[in-house]
Amino acid sequence: MTNRRTDRFTGKRGKTWLIVGLSLPMVSFLIIPCISLLHRLASIDVLDSLAGRQIEQAIALSGVTTGITTIIAIIAGTPVAYLLARRDFAGKSIIDTFIDLPILIPPSVAGIALLLAFGRRGLIGGYLSELGVEIPFTQAAVILAQLFVAAPFYIKSAQIGLSSIDPELEEAAEIDGASSWMRFRLITAPLAMQAFAGGAIMTWARALGEFGATIIFAGNFPGRTQTMPLAIYMGFEIDFKIAVTLSMILLILSFGVLLTVRKLLKHRLRIL
């Protein structure tokens, strides 16, 4: 019996090492570029690279626009998530697909679509232009580009969170006389808060890294529409140190976001 257990353990350990060996090439491919960025950053004076006014403006603009984008996504996206999670209606699958679409299409396609919608001769932009409202190549265009590609992350996360709540909890509150708003504020929202938070964090991170739609719809004007990813693009052509420094900042922020979301989801799974 003991020999049989030993053979089974040895065989299992051998299979584990085989799987590790097969996994190593892909894991190494994904990790090595990040390590290379860290290694290159060690030879760069970070403070000196960040001292330029153009870089400070790019960081500040990214902070402001992504914050606004995330707030809009939460306020406008929560009703959409609730509708998709709690109601059945004709065309629901089509709307759900359109919400997922910005996640899948190339960012450059998103930029062209936004330009055709809100440009001076666009579907909606033409009417706005007659009223004296110009959106393309402004900070509003930066926010709209970020919102278009990033809001689906919040909506889908909130939708999943709302769908996982037991309707009987809300029905019990309704029996006790709670209004729809009270039920949402006191029961639904707290129970789905981790999903809301995870979606908001992912939305912010996606907005922070947005490049393709922004450069087409908003342009790359320092101090006006140049966000951190666009500054990296320009820095690659003018000053590679700046590009490396900003890339490292985005890498660290993205890593932190993923760890935070993973912890939120892990904690939620424990509760459920």
Image (cartoon, rainbow, N blue to C red):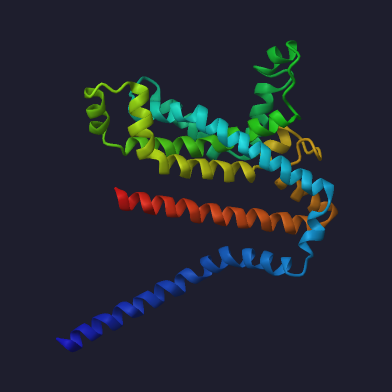
Q: Does residue 161 appear in this view?
A: no
Residue 161: quadrant of the picture: top left
Horizontal relation, residue 196 to residue 125: left or right: left
Q: Is residue 169 visible?
A: yes
Quarter of the figure that contains the N terminus: bottom left
Q: Is residue 55 above or below residue 112?
A: below
Q: Measured along the vertical axis of the image, is residue 108 above or below residue 1?
A: above
The residue positioned 53% from the left and 69% from the top of the image is 25
The image position of residue 96, as x and y in percent, is 44, 30
User: Which residue extends farthest left?
Assistant: 1
Percent x, y for residue 164? 31, 39
> How many numbered marks, from 0 up?
0
Most extreme residue toward the bottom, as rendered? 3
Q: Nearer the viewer, residue 184 or 204?
A: 184
Q: Residue 189 in the image: state x and y as whole percent.
A: 39, 34
Look at 58% across and 53% down and name the residue there: 254
Judged left or right of residue 83, residue 7 is: left
Q: Which of 222 and 19 lies nearest the eye of the viewer?
A: 222
| Up-down relation of residue 261 to residue 4 (above or below) | above
Q: Residue at x 47, y 50 (%)?
A: 261
Residue ID at (63%, 39%): 66
The image position of residue 73, as x and y in percent, is 54, 32
The front one of 160 and 197 is 197
Residue 156 in the image: above or below residue 178: below
Left/right of residue 222 with respect to residue 183 in the rendered view: right
